[in-house]
Image: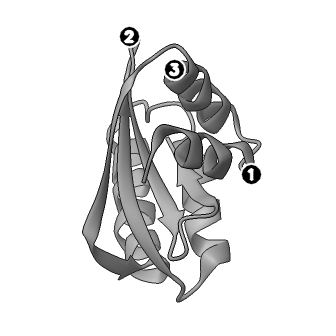
Amino acid sequence: MNRDALKSALSWDGCISARAALAELEAGADFKVFLNQTVSAQQLWDIWSWRHEVMLDTGVIPRPGLTEAIAGLQAAGTARVYMATVTGSQRRFTLFLSEDLAQCVACW
């Protein structure tokens, strides 16, 4: 996957984190797409919704966008997703991309 394809996938997600990740990509940030394996969005929702709950219960402030990303994973249901990262000047973003790599399902 090249930079332009990733930018296109991020442009489908209107959340604040996706827009910030897109801005970092446009500014030349490094990125990596892990194409060796997909996972069910439902499995990721199970994991991240639990982690989010634990964070809130223990007073840890989640990174911006995590709540919206969890909702995106839940909405994707059992669809298979790929993981990607964008490492910008301000922070590192975690992305989950649709199996056809055309859309960003979740970003934080």
The residue that disc 1 covers is 12
Relative to residue 9, is residue 40 drawn left or right? left
Give the vertical position of 50 relative to 53 (above or below).
below
Which residue appears at 34% of the width and 77% of the height? 38
The residue that disc 2 covers is 89
Q: If the image is split into quadrants, where does the N terminus sit?
A: bottom left
Disc 3 to disc 2: CB gap under 8 Å: yes
Which residue appears at 40% of the width and 67% of the height? 82
Query: What is the x, y in percent for residue 75?
Result: 67, 74
The residue that disc 3 covers is 24
Mark 2 element type? loop
Quarter residue 15 falls in: top right
Q: Which mark is residue 30?
A: none
Q: Earlier in the sequence, mark 1 or mark 3?
A: 1
The count of marks equals 3
Mark pair 3, 2: CA separation: 7 Å
Given the image, on which type of amino acid does mark 1 rest? Answer: Trp
Given the image, on which type of amino acid does mark 3 rest? Answer: Glu
